[in-house]
Amino acid sequence: MIYRVSGLAEVTAAFFAVFLSFSATAWAGKPLISEVRVGVLNHDVGIFGSSKENGVDINAEILFRRLGNKSAAERKKFIPWFLSPRPHLGTSVNSQGDTSIFYAGLTWDVDLGQKFFFNTSFGGAVHDGEKTSLRPDKKELGCRVLFRGSASLGYNLTRHVNISAMFEHASNAGLCNNNEGLNNAGVRLGYRF
């Protein structure tokens, strides 16, 4: 189990190193990375299912430059907003050797005034947990590759720094025999470039 977490952590660190090295690179003069978030999540919370696994997760996420060239005013309309998400890469690494995930997808942002914001995301994840297990302390996630969604409600502390409460859910949507799903919730600190 320790080897699996260690291997996932090494792969995750390599991905973050590569993408952070591109942060100074520009697409049309703008940085590739728009925001970095790190936080602590309560692992396998009992929301929408049972809680079997333990520990906390260290969560890290890179949000890339928004797709499309829509202005803030244009993004307030549904279709331009939907067509201009930010791609993301992230990981939630478990402190107790239980299920860790590496994920990628798209994040949509909603400003709730000047200080508050809401994010929702959807994508896929790979995990190092159990697909099937007879152990009562292990989730049966069915497939190695899962769907992953999240929601965050946040507050802008400064122009660059924010804090948010986040909930993430990963499951196979019934595509495999077992589908217990994994839910994590916690707090993250973000830095916008």
Image (cartoon, rainbow, N blue to C red):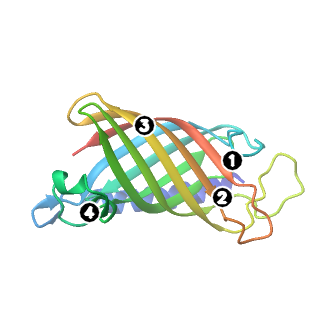
The answer to the question of whether label 3 and label 2 lie on touching residues, with beta carbons closer than 8 A, is no
Label 1 close to label 2 by CB (< 8 Å): yes
Residue 52 image offset from top left, x and y in percent:
78, 43
Q: Amino acid at mark 1?
A: Gly
Q: Is residue 1 above or below residue 37?
A: below
Say which amino acid is labelled 4. Pro
Query: Looking at this rendering, what residue extends furthest in the left direction?
Result: 29
Q: Which residue is mark 3?
A: 153
Q: Nearer the viewer, residue 22 or 34?
A: 34
Q: Amino acid at mark 2?
A: Arg
Q: Residue 97's mark?
A: 1
Q: CA distance from mark 3 to mark 4?
A: 22 Å
Ranked by sequence position, the earlier of labels 1 and 4 is: 4
Q: Which mark is residue 80?
A: 4
Q: Earlier in the sequence, mark 1 or mark 2?
A: 2
**Residue with the most extreme right position:** 134
